[in-house]
Amino acid sequence: MQIDEIKRKVKGDLGKEILFYKTTDSTNSIALKLAEENREGLVILSDSQEKGRGRLGRPWISPPGVNIYMSIVLKPVAKPGDATLITLMTAVACAIALRKITRLDIRIKWPNDLMVSDKKLGGILTELKVYQEKIVFAVVGIGINVNVDTKLLPEEIRQIATSVRNETGQGYSREDIVAEVLCQMHRWYSAFKRMDRETILSGWRSLTSTLGREVVVTAGQETCKGFAEAIDEEGRLLLRLPSGEVKKISSGDIGIPE
Ligand code: BTN
């Protein structure tokens, strides 16, 4: 990857400093180690990951030369409860950047999966250091399947995942996508710093494929079916159960009922 090219294209404060690795265990792990003594906006990029991490303790398949694995260090003045908003704003920034470059109809599946044609194109993992009820730093990890040929992925992943190349039939510059994601992140993070919740939530609502339909939510051992009505100001999913009761869900996986 051409880091100078990315730096030239980036507007804003995020990504002025980028560290690039040929391989790492996980860019989030490196960012968590370096966040303390570095400034906000530090970006860790890697060509591949040996132990890429996904949400809910899952692995993130990270082959070399084809995809984007990056982590951004943020140091907002915020409370741990605002972490969901950080993740939602990152999903909005990534979706807008990818829509602009690829023209694909990218949608966000609650809370932060980047989807196209009901298959997953990318994901976000936010990890925090918290001290005395304040965020010391947040590491926002972004994985995007860009040029991977999904035929080469394991069967169980192939059924649920896709890549930009798979959807468009052409290869894309990872540098262009990283630079655009960082530009959009600068814009949406500014809204976060102003605590402009409504801008972020309405941006998210306009891009989601989750609301206004029947869904199945799996959270730990529990599964519930219902109507995905809205998200609240903290980004929780409001699920109307068949009983009429509305359940607030902070994390989980969304599926479509059979
Ligand atoms: C998800 O499960 O949807 C989140 C996936 C996040 C993957 C990215 S790749 C870069 C960063 N480093 C990691 O180990 N994970 C995140």
Image (cartoon, helix red, strand yellow):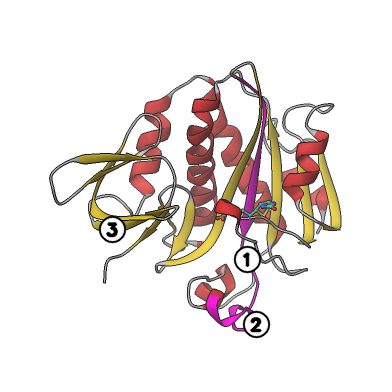
Q: Which mark is residue 220?
A: none
Q: Is residue 137 above or below residue 29?
A: above
Residue toward you, 149 or 141: 141
Q: Looking at the image, which residue is at 61% across and 80% down? A: 154
Disc 3 to disc 2, C-alpha distance: 30 Å
Q: Disc 2 designates what residue?
A: 152
Q: Amino acid at mark 1?
A: Val
Residue 249 shows in this picture = yes
Q: Quadrant of the N terminus?
A: bottom right
Q: Along the polypeptide, which appears first: circle 1 or circle 3? A: 1
Q: Disc 3 designates what residue?
A: 215
Q: Which residues are magenta?
A: 134-156
Q: Position of residue 253 (x, y in %)?
A: 42, 55
Q: Looking at the image, which residue is at 56% across and 20% down? A: 78
| Magenta stretch: includes residue 139 | yes
Q: Amino acid at mark 3?
A: Val
In the image, which is nearer the foreground, mark 1 or mark 2? 2
Q: Disc 1 designates what residue?
A: 146
Packing grade of label 1 (10 A; few <14, some 14-19, many >=20) is many
Q: Residue furthest front?
A: 221
On the picture, is 253 further left or further right than 186?
A: left
